[in-house]
Image: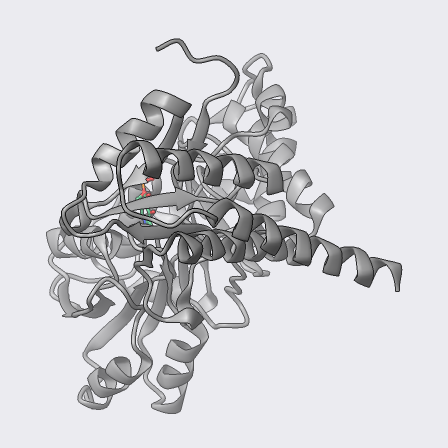
Amino acid sequence: MIHTGRHFLQIPGPTNVPDRVLAAMARPVLDHRGLEFAELAREVLEGLRPVFQTTGPVVLFPASGTGAWEASIVNTFSPGDRAVLFETGHFSMLWKQVAEKFGVQVDYVSGNWRRGASPADLEARLRADSSHAIKAVMVVHNETSTGVTSRVPELRRVMNELRHPALLMVDVISSLGSIDYRHDEWEVDVTVAGSQKGLMLPPGMSFNALSPKALAANRQARLPRSYWDWQQMLEPNRSGFFPYTPPTNLLYGLREALHMLSEEGLPNVFRRHARHGEATRAAVRAWGLELLCEEPREYSNSLTAVLVPPGHDADHLRSVILENFDMSLGSGLSKLGGKVFRIGHLGSFNDLMLAGTLSGIEMGLRLAGVPHREGGVAAALDSLASTAQACAASTAR
Ligand SMILES: Cc1ncc(COP(=O)(O)O)c(C=O)c1O
């Protein structure tokens, strides 16, 4: 089938890259040891801090998010150290595997992939650890495989109440720049992020935001590290340079994306994602389908994972939608394969893009013969229109 117009990339990342960012990157490559580069690097490294809501350093690696996972581990642990990591879904499992490959003993707190990290489970683990053998608590803030967001401040509260000295390490790969996340206020020690989701950039850059406590732990940590070494990165970063060749044109894109986020204002960015999350869930409910996330306080505002009824194949539905309407939706990962489809509603996105996305899904449900009720799109439009009016009314006052 020949498709016309734009492809709808509605996977939960990589996300659509706005024209402004694409245009900013379409420039000649510059000398990464020259002064013009140093100015660009200093500007973006500084400009990233408010997005993480931190005043501390943010380290940037030319790598996908998995690189920043590895960096979080090799910079903080020594061989045989223990960590608590919550089973929230596919990505928690992969982060655990990286830690284990480096000899970290991971206490994996089991979960059903439908809820976020449990503060009560953390309390039990930390209470039992009177010798403070646990060196880090690790959690995926927004589990991209399930559409569930963990309540990080509640985990931090448990750690503080028990005066447990473990580091708190949080993966925000699919929440940074789309769901409220506060590195400093929530006393997170290492934040792991990537470029290809809320930051509206192509894949290829990832980040660690660091607390003073993380930097102190780094000085004691004995795991071998080279490419990912924070110290070797922080030193040249001070004058705007990198220890190896940086992704120069991606940095032009990053500068533009940071401008866009600051023009919109982070609170508005979060509000926009919340409206789109709410409207998407309204559509799913109206279709009579089931959200994978079981806990309303943990609904993700950057993506929604939807269960298809038993006996139906989510991958068949996705292929019908791709073939007929040129739209990519996220697949179910590992044990959720064929059982869920995931709608990405993060990054460079607006009301009419969401309306188009949900229309493609509603038509696809019909064509693929998945039992559902009509009216999901109408419910989403109602939700969008009512909150748009609320925005207009509050502006008029
Ligand atoms: C929450 C989360 N963590 C980690 C990763 C791994 O990142 P990457 O695929 O960029 O290496 C992803 C990728 O989608 C993710 O969503």
Residue 102: percent from left, percent from top = 14, 53
Say whether residue 245 is visible. yes
Q: Nearer the viewer, residue 355 or 394?
A: 355
User: Where is 267 relative to 373, above or below?
Assistant: below
Residue plotted at (16% across, 52% down) = 310
Residue 132 x/y as whole percent:
23, 83
Farthest residue, direction top: 2
Q: How is the image coloured?
A: one colour
Residue drawn at 55 percent across, 40 percent down: 355
Q: Residue 308 at what x, y percent from top left?
A: 25, 49
- Give the tally of numbered discs: 0
Q: Residue at (23%, 41%) from the top-left corner? A: 314
Quadrant where the C terminus is found in the figure: bottom right
Residue 227 in sight: no
Q: Please, is residue 125 above or below residue 196 in the view?
A: below
Quarter of the figure with residue 75: bottom left
* Location of residue 285 with respect to 133 vertically, above or below: above
Residue with the most extreme right position: 397
Q: Quadrant of residue 291?
A: bottom left
Q: Is residue 18 left or right of residue 292?
A: right
**Residue under the point 52% across and 34% down:** 356
Q: Quadrant of ligand 1?
A: top left
- Asked if residue 134 lies left or right of residue 28, the reply is left
Residue closer to the observer: 112 or 165: 112
* 310 shown above or below 327: below
Q: Quadrant of the N terminus?
A: top left
Residue 229 pos. (x, y %): 33, 47
Left or right: residue 128 versus residue 348 is: left
In this rendering, position of residue 360 left or right of residue 263: left
